Every structure is written in structure tokens, then in C-alpha cells.
Image (cartoon, rainbow, N blue to C red):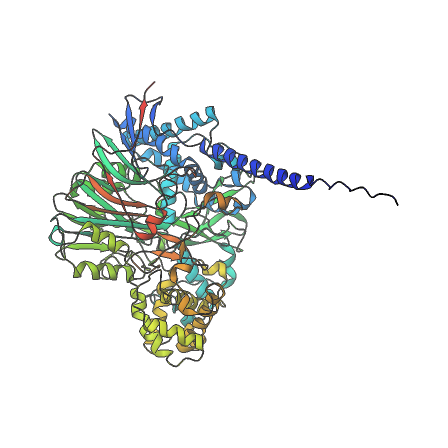
């Protein structure tokens, strides 16, 4: 019998190999993370030590405080604005470049074909053409500020060209920015006039209504019934839907809150001022907070990135804030084209030749597009940027912002004002966009003025497009500066504005057909009337106030109509609303039900009858729907409510849709719903729409936030609950001590993803934790800029 020898056990090398393989992967991943972190961090700007800055006349110091706010101190204005341009570029260069490209219609050059329609639209409007023509209207001092600011930006660009340490966005898109110019700053200023809206969209939308629906149904969505029969052209003459397909429409009522309280109602005996402009919420913020100090000026506040000076804030003597007045400063003119010559248009029984401007559009990885803009006597033809939309009829835009203007001159003068008289004098040059200025000074004065160029028309009230072939509808002048709405030291002891109607119908001039919903203004006044001995903390609390007066108006009436409504889920929702305190708090279900329900009511009434592209033109939609509901609840339903089955049917159907939609994301148990689970702010970076860059730029995710579009704490939201619009900057100051003020700039000061000031104010923005900015001897990182 043959012996069986024991066999050696197989070596378990495969386990070692697997461990070695995954270990290697882990090491490589760690190395990659470290390398990426080093690469991203290399573009962080110098904020400490000494740097040589060519062009300076004297040494400048820059102290960045704990919130990243630069306190720039110079010995003269030349150095002050040069340093401001340099420091802004350190924190916001990519944003600045993208902003000028957006407003100039030059995004396609770095983004590609998908931005062409956007570029065509802004080339048609001509914001850059208006900016370039504005430069010569500035004084030598204004031009110098613009030019040295641009020089400061270019000094930083030159440093990056030498070091190669570009902000990561430029690397990802594969380009370097062109040199900065004064026209770039002015173009961004003109874009702000665009972003704060106009009224041409409403005119086009009303024209569409009249061409599409019976007269009574069309007028049911007008802000009020017109006094005179409007001019109506046939449907075959102009296709509104096609004319403005893809038009860039600013957010409805890009507005704000502001108020000022007399010392008679404050704890310190000096005025209080509060301001919170409502704009799009993004990374970086539209605002850049700065403190500028020189022998001739000591001013603190915010400015749009890419512009010198301080547009909102305070100096040692005065403080000011703005909201959007929203006047009718635009008119669409119906132009008759010569069938034999497309570049000629009728006027006073003659054919006038239009101005044709070549606007070639460069496209990344594509051919340059030969694009032309047609400009009639009234302005650019805006109805054909998306393609030919009519046979012989087009629409041209007349707009105050397309005229040369010198708003920066006004800003620089406001920065130095010592009292109301000097401040109001500075406003002479602030022509567009028209704004509601509130003012307070250390001498106890509080004041208000609706300031800007507001047209006086020969005929018409800017409700609809008007004939361009006659002089009957021309602008004859503007409301005189001394006759613009104004009040100084009113008996009430406070002044507040929230984009509401400015003045009574007794005022001799037309201002606007549309005003924001009144709920924010009502709540602000309710609070200020009821309280005395007010403090800066009270002002902060009011800016974060979540009381929903729209709910207070409508919920009891909705409950009465739907009492006994069928459906277990609907009954549960109504019970939740019955117990609600009408506060849009993050931990309650009722705010979610009510605010989404109000949106769904509009969808039920309008979406099936009006194309989506055209519905975007309906800027007065919220106020119009409120009025439709009020009339129906008072027993006088209009055609839109009646044709939808009556008010009960509209409410029941929209509530059912609301609950079914929310159930998909929130679950079937309404008692588990919380407003903050749905209603979350995301300060999205412009490149975050491209996956996976969202993980790089939006690493914080959504943050629950209270309020809504109708509360003082403004927080408007998209259909998925994302809060994308609200108080982009919050500001409170007690004039008893102008050395300090309270600010919130969400999500932070820096545009660099690796900066400690990138998203450090995100949570603060959501919960209302303000940071104090002190002017005298600020503490923080110190950078010394020296001349060559």
C-alpha cells in the first residue's frame, strides 16, 4: 500500500492581493483628494502681509474682519477705488466676469451654443450700448473712479496671468478673462435696472389676452379696467407666444422691504433704519460688503460686484436703503414695417429707416453668428430676437435704462452726504432703476423719496402696446424731480415701503399699473404702529417676521367654503389649517399646505388655457389671482373662476392636487409634514447645474427656512420647494452709533470655494443671526498694499 503524503495548503495570496489592491485605491483616493484640495486652495487670495500694487500713490491697508468684510483705508480717493477694484477681484473675479458677459450678451463665447438665445436677447436690449454711451455723461471725478477701479481689477488679473493661479471656474471653462473697463462696471449697473424689472412683459401679456380671449375674460386679469378702450391689433398681426419665446424675464417684483423709524419711537431717541433687498439667492451673493475710508469719505455697506463705491449703507452721518418702486418706465410700440423694405417703419405717413447694428456672437467650439439688431425711433425691436414673429408688424421697446445715465455719480455723492439736503441733491443723477429711498441721519431726520426717471406720456397709461406710427403716444417728458413722491419727518413717526402702491390716486402723474401684494407692507406697519421704544434687535426680528397676512385673509374663507369636503386627506388638511396661527414656521405643516395651495389655484385657473412661455410674461399674476379670489369670495366670480366650475370647485380641485403632489415627497401622514422639509434655501453656484460640479460648489445642501413670498422674511420658492429668492442682504442700523451696523450677506463674502467666508453666513441667513460691522479700528487679517 502506497503511502499518501500530506499536500501543502494553498497559499492565500489572493487575499493579500485584494487587500493590496483596495489599499492602493484608498491611498490613490487620499492623494487625489489632497491634490484637489491643494489645487483649489492655490487660488485663495493673499489676505495678510504685504503686497506691491502698481498704480498706488500711497500705502493702503485692508483689514478683513471675522466675516470677510474688507475695510479699505487709503490716503486719497484714487488709491481707495484702485484698491477696491483689486480686492473685489480677489474675492469675486469669476462672478464679475460672468456678470458683464451676461449683461453684454457674451456668454456663448465661454459656455457655448446653449447660451446663444440668451445672448441674442441681451444684444437686442443693448444694455452694453447704453452703458458705453453713459460714460461721457460722467464728471471727471466719476470717470476717474471708474477708471482706477478698472485698473485695480486689471492689476489682479495681471497677477493671475503671471502666477497661473486662476479661480477654478476659469480652469473648468478653459478661458481667461479680458481686461476690465469702465464700460463693464456701467454695464453691470444697467443690468441691475433690468433685473429690477419693467412692465413690457405685462403689456405683451395683456395684448395676448385681448387677442386670444373674449373681452370680459381678458379684462378679468387686468390690474384694473382701463378707462379708455385700448388699441387692439388682430391676432394674425403679432404672435406674442413666438415673439418672446426664451426671453429672459426678471423675477416678479424683485422688490424689498425698508423702513425708517423716528427717534420718538426708539429706545435710544435716534432713528433706526432697516433694509433688505429681495433678489435672486445664489453663490456668490449679488452683494459685496465693504467699508471704504479716505479723508473725503467714510462709508460702509454693499455694492454689486464689479462696481466702485457703496450703493446701500451708511456713513458717519446718514444711512439709507431702497426698495423697488416698480414704475411703468417701458413701452412696447407696435411698428408697421414697409413690405418693400424690412428696415423701414411707418411714422407720420412716411417710411423711416431704422438703425441696423451688427452684433456678431462668438460661440465656443462653434462658428460666429452674424446677428443684427434693428432699432426704430422708439428703441430696439425686441419681438424678433427668437425669430421672425409677424408679417408686417413688430414690437419695439422704449425704456429709460437704454438712455445714457450716471447712477454711479449719484452713488459716489450719496456716500459723502452729511444730511438730507445733500443726499437728495445726490439723487438728481440716480435715474434708473427708480427706487424708494428711505433715509435717516444723526440729526434725527427721517425721509422718503420715490426717485428716478418716470415718463409722462402724451396719451395712454402703459397698459398695452401702443401705435408707433403716430406721435400720439410719445413720451413728452418725465415727472419733475421736485414733484416725485416724498415725505420728511411724518407725524406717524415711521416710513415703510414694500413695493406697495406709492401714493393715492390724487397724485397728478401715472406711476404704475401693478404693485406688489400688500401683505409685507401691512405686517411692517402693523408692527411699527403697535410698538414704542424700538431697538435694533426689534428691527432684526421684524426682518425675520414670518406672519402670513395672506393666510389670515383667505384661510377662514376657504375653510368656510370647503366645510364638510369629501376625502379624508382633505379633511385632515383643513383641520391643520383651522388650528394654524398663520405663521410660516419651519416646523409646521400648515405653511406647506397653504403656500403650495395658493400656487395650485393659479395653475388650475390658467395653465390649461395659456401656454407656459406666454404665462411667464404675466408679472402681475399674484396680485391678479388674489383679486380674482376676493371677487369670487364676495359672490362676484369672474369668467376665469366661473368657467373653472366656481370657487368651491376651484378650491377643492387645487387642494386635492396640492396634497397629492406633496404626498410624493412628504408621505401620506400630514401630521408629519414640516414646512422646512420642503421649503429649503440653496445658494446655487452658476456652474452647479453641471453634474458633478454641484458637489463641489453646493456642498452645504438645502437649509430649512421659514417665511414665504408674502411674509416680511421673504423666501419665495420654486415648484420643488427650493427657496431661490429673498432678502439677499439684510441691514439694520441705529443712528445713535454710526460706528456700527448689523448685516447679513447670504451665503458669504467670498466666491472662492475654499475660502472660510464662502458659505459661513448660510445658516446665519436662515435663522437670522446678524454680524456686527465696526468701522473704527476693525480687527482681522491685515493686508498692506504698497506702491512700486
Of the pair 226 and 149, the residue shown nearer to us = 149
Question: Is 762 in front, or is 200?
Answer: 762
Q: Position of residue 564 (x, y in %)?
A: 39, 81
Q: Is residue 477 left or right of residue 241?
A: left
Give whichever of 419, 314 is nearer the camera.
Answer: 314
Residue 367 place in picture, x, y as percent: 59, 38
Quarter of the image where the N terminus is located: top right
- How far across and down, in percent of the image, does residue 217 sit? 42, 71
Percent of width and height locating residue 690: 53, 46
Q: Residue furthest bottom?
A: 564
Q: Is residue 439 above or below residue 412?
A: below
Q: Residue furthest right?
A: 1
Tell whether 599 sits left or right of 545.
right
Residue 25 at least partly seen: yes
The part of the image, by quadrant, that contains residue 188 is: top left
Residue lying at the far top of the rendered structure: 788
Q: Is residue 38 above or below residue 233?
A: above
Residue 731 higher or lower than 224, as above or below = above
Amino acid at each position: 500500500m502506497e503511502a499518501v503524503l500530506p499536500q501543502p495548503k494553498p497559499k492565500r495570496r489572493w487575499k493579500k492581493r485584494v487587500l493590496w489592491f483596495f489599499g492602493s485605491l484608498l491611498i490613490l483616493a487620499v492623494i487625489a483628494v489632497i491634490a484637489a484640495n491643494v489645487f483649489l486652495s492655490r487660488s485663495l487670495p493673499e489676505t495678510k502681509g504685504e503686497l506691491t500694487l502698481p498704480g498706488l500713490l500711497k500705502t493702503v491697508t485692508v483689514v478683513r474682519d471675522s466675516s470677510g468684510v474688507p475695510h479699505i483705508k487709503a490716503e486719497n480717493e484714487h488709491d481707495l477705488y484702485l484698491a477696491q477694484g483689486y480686492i473685489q477681484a480677489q474675492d469675486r473675479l469669476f462672478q464679475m466676469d460672468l456678470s458683464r458677459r451676461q449683461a453684454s450678451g457674451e456668454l456663448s463665447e465661454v459656455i457655448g451654443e446653449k447660451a446663444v438665445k440668451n445672448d441674442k436677447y441681451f444684444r437686442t436690449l443693448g444694455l452694453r450700448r447704453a452703458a458705453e454711451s453713459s460714460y461721457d455723461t460722467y464728471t471727471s471725478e466719476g470717470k476717474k473712479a471708474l477708471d482706477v477701479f478698472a485698473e485695480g481689477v486689471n492689476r489682479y488679473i495681471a497677477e493671475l496671468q503671471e502666477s497661473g493661479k486662476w479661480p477654478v471656474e476659469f480652469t473648468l471653462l478653459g478661458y481667461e478673462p479680458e481686461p476690465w473697463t469702465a464700460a463693464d462696471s456701467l454695464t453691470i449697473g444697467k443690468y441691475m435696472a433690468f433685473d429690477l424689472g419693467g412692465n413690457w412683459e405685462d403689456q405683451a401679456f395683456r395684448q395676448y389676452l385681448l387677442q386670444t380671449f373674449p373681452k370680459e375674460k381678458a379684462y378679468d386679469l387686468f390690474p384694473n379696467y382701463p378707462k379708455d378702450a385700448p388699441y387692439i391689433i388682430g391676432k394674425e398681426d403679432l404672435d406674442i407666444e413666438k415673439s418672446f419665446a426664451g426671453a429672459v424675464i426678471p423675477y416678479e417684483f424683485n422688490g424689498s422691504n425698508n423702513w425708517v423709524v423716528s427717534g420718538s419711537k426708539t429706545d435710544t431717541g435716534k432713528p433706526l433704519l432697516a433694509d433688505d433687498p429681495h433678489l435672486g439667492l445664489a453663490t456668490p451673493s449679488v452683494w459685496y460688503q465693504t467699508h471704504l475710508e479716505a479723508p473725503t469719505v467714510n462709508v460702509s455697506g454693499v455694492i454689486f460686484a464689479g462696481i466702485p463705491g457703496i450703493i446701500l449703507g451708511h456713513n458717519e452721518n446718514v444711512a439709507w436703503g431702497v426698495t423697488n418702486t416698480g414704475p411703468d418706465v417701458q413701452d412696447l410700440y407696435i411698428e408697421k414695417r414697409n413690405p418693400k423694405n424690412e428696415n423701414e417703419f411707418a411714422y407720420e405717413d412716411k417710411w423711416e429707416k431704422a438703425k441696423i447694428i451688427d452684433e456678431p456672437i462668438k460661440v465656443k467650439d462653434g462658428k460666429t453668428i452674424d446677428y443684427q439688431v434693428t432699432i426704430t425711433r422708439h428703441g430696439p425691436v425686441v419681438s424678433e430676437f427668437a425669430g421672425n414673429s409677424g408679417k408686417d408688424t413688430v414690437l419695439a421697446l422704449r425704456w429709460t435704462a437704454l438712455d445714457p445715465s450716471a447712477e454711479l455719480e449719484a452713488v459716489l455723492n450719496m456716500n459723502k452726504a452729511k444730511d438730507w439736503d445733500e443726499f437728495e441733491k445726490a439723487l438728481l443723477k440716480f435715474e434708473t432703476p427708480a427706487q424708494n429711498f428711505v433715509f435717516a441721519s444723526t440729526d434725527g431726520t427721517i425721509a422718503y423719496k420715490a426717485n428716478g426717471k418716470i415718463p409722462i406720456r402724451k396719451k395712454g397709461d402703459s397698459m398695452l402696446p401702443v401705435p408707433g406710427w403716430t406721435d400720439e403716444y410719445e413720451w413728452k417728458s418725465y415727472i419733475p424731480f421736485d414733484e416725485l413722491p416724498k415725505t420728511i419727518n411724518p407725524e406717524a413717526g415711521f416710513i415703510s415701503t414694500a413695493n406697495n402702491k406709492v401714493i393715492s390716486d390724487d397724485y397728478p402723474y401715472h406711476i404704475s399699473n401693478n404693485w406688489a401684494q400688500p401683505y409685507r407692507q401691512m405686517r411692517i406697519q402693523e408692527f411699527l404702529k403697535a410698538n414704542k421704544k424700538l431697538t435694533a434687535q426689534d428691527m432684526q426680528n421684524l426682518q425675520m417676521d414670518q406672519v402670513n397676512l395672506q393666510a389670515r385673509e383667505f384661510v377662514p374663507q376657504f375653510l368656510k367654503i370647503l366645510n364638510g369636503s369629501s376625502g379624508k386627506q382633505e379633511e385632515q388638511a383643513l383641520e391643520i389649517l383651522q388650528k394654524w396661527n398663520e405663521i410660516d414656521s419651519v416646523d409646521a405643516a400648515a405653511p406647506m399646505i397653504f403656500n403650495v395651495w395658493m400656487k395650485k389655484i393659479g395653475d388650475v385657473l390658467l395653465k390649461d388655457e395659456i401656454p407656459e412661455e406666454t404665462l411667464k410674461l404675466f408679472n402681475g399674476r399674484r396680485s391678479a389671482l388674489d383679486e380674482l379670489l376676493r371677487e369670487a369670495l364676495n359672490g362676484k366670480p369672474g369668467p376665469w373662476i366661473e368657467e373653472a366650475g366656481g370657487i368651491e370647485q376651484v378650491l377643492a380641485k387645487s387642494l386635492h392636487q396640492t396634497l397629492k403632489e406633496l404626498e410624493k415627497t412628504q408621505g401620506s401622514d400630514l401630521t408629519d409634514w414640516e414646512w422646512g422639509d420642503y421649503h429649503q434655501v440653496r445658494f446655487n453656484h452658476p456652474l452647479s447645474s453641471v453634474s458633478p460640479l454641484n458637489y463641489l460648489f453646493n456642498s452645504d445642501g438645502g437649509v430649512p427656512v421659514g417665511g414665504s413670498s408674502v411674509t416680511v422674511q421673504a423666501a419665495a420658492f420654486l415648484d420643488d420647494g427650493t427657496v431661490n429668492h429673498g432678502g439677499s442682504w439684510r441691514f439694520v442700523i441705529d443712528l445713535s452709533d454710526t460706528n456700527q451696523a448689523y448685516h447679513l450677506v447670504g451665503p458669504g463674502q467670498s466666491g472662492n470655494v475654499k475660502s472660510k467666508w464662502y458659505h459661513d453666513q448660510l445658516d446665519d441667513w436662515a435663522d437670522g443671526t446678524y454680524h456686527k460691522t465696526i468701522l473704527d479700528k476693525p480687527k482681522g487679517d491685515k493686508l498692506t498694499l504698497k506702491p512700486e
